[in-house]
Amino acid sequence: MKAAVLYGANQVEIREVSVPGNVQSGEVIADVEFVGVCKTDQQLTMAGLDEERILGHEVVCRLPQEKGYFALNNEISCGQCTYCREQLTSHCLNLQELGVNHDGGYAQKMRVPRKSLHPFELDNPALGALIEPMSCAVRGAGRILAATNLLSVSRPKTLIIGGGLSGVLISYLLNHSPNFDGEIYLYDITKAPLPWVDRLGIQRVEVPEPDQAHLIVECSGSPDGLATALRLVRKAGIVCIYGVPKQGISLPVSPHELFMREITVITSFAGATDETMGAAIAHIKRDEEFFEQLLGRMIPLEKLPTELTVWCPQPGTRTVVDMSA
Ligand SMILES: [Zn+2]
Ligand SMILES: [Zn+2]
């Protein structure tokens, strides 16, 4: 079968490899249909891994004996460790992540546990590539909403930094949550148009001002974005690090200043569970037309090596590998 193999830092190539064997009980060989190209893939590609690996964790697949499409929860937790016992399965001490530390979906077929596959019905099955990132955003929005209890206002001015897919999904979930009544603003360094901003009735700011936002969600993953968030947030405000920060970057942060300004910093790391996958599917199904505009370029697998090494997604959209293209 055809697969995109990462074999070194910034080294990806399309190869003919054997179909995964050694199928254990509870596992199936799925036919991959669509795979989202995520910034995590680009970061893993840039850094390289110790072993050769097939990346791809935002997977839509089909099964030979069953009807319909399935979205993959790529996190496989052990169910036994102290974190699993606290339902923190993303922090499982024995976590296996398909497409990260095990082979993933940038291949014609992949080996997956049957119970990691979530059936969905959407008019456009390619939208299924948004289910995994949406699932992570469901967890993120949940953590943000829980933290807003610390704020002294019920309608927090909220600044989203970064208009990429993470920024959209978090904005969407806050905007549609019955438990959130804040005003949302978006700041993105690009001047590119972001149609979803208007569709959600969100105001875009050219230059965000200090001391305005009670809540800032950093969705760009850039050190500048985080520095900006910490600088701008109001006293007694909240900064959520949602965009995955690059490895190996540190920031000069003054603990004294954080203390004096009483800043709360929260984060949200991954978090695909059966529950969040189900919620993600429900959100996308309810509003397919909105999510349709977040699908970016559809590319064949052959174009993936370039896509990963020359990272330039259309702003606010997800590029998707179409295995049948
Ligand atoms: Zn991802
Ligand atoms: Zn565990």
Image (cartoon, rainbow, N blue to C red):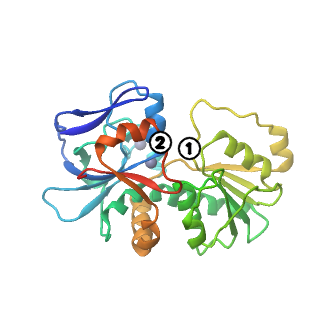
Q: Amino acid at mark 1?
A: Val
Measured along the vertical axis of the image, is residue 111 above or below residue 320? Answer: above
Look at the numbered disc 2 and say if its residue's Cβ is closer than 8 Å to ligand 1. yes
**Which element carries disc 2, helix, strand or loop?**
helix
How many discs mark residues in the rendered view?
Answer: 2
Residue at the image point whose x is 64% and y is 71% from the top: 180
Q: Residues within 10 Å of mark 1 (few under 14, many from 20)?
A: some
Residue 185, given in percent of the width and then of the height, sits at 69, 64
Q: Quadrant of the N terminus?
A: top left
Measured along the vertical axis of the image, is residue 257 above or below residue 271? Answer: above
Give the residue pinned by disc 2: 40
In this view, the residue in front, 312 or 65, is: 312
Measured along the vertical axis of the image, is residue 272 above or below residue 310? Answer: below
In the drawing, what numbered circle is on residue 244? Answer: 1
State the separation of the CA atoms marked 2 and 1.
8 Å
In the drawing, what numbered circle is on residue 213? Answer: none
Q: Amino acid at mark 2?
A: Thr
Are the residues tagged 2 and 1 within 8 Å (C-beta)? yes
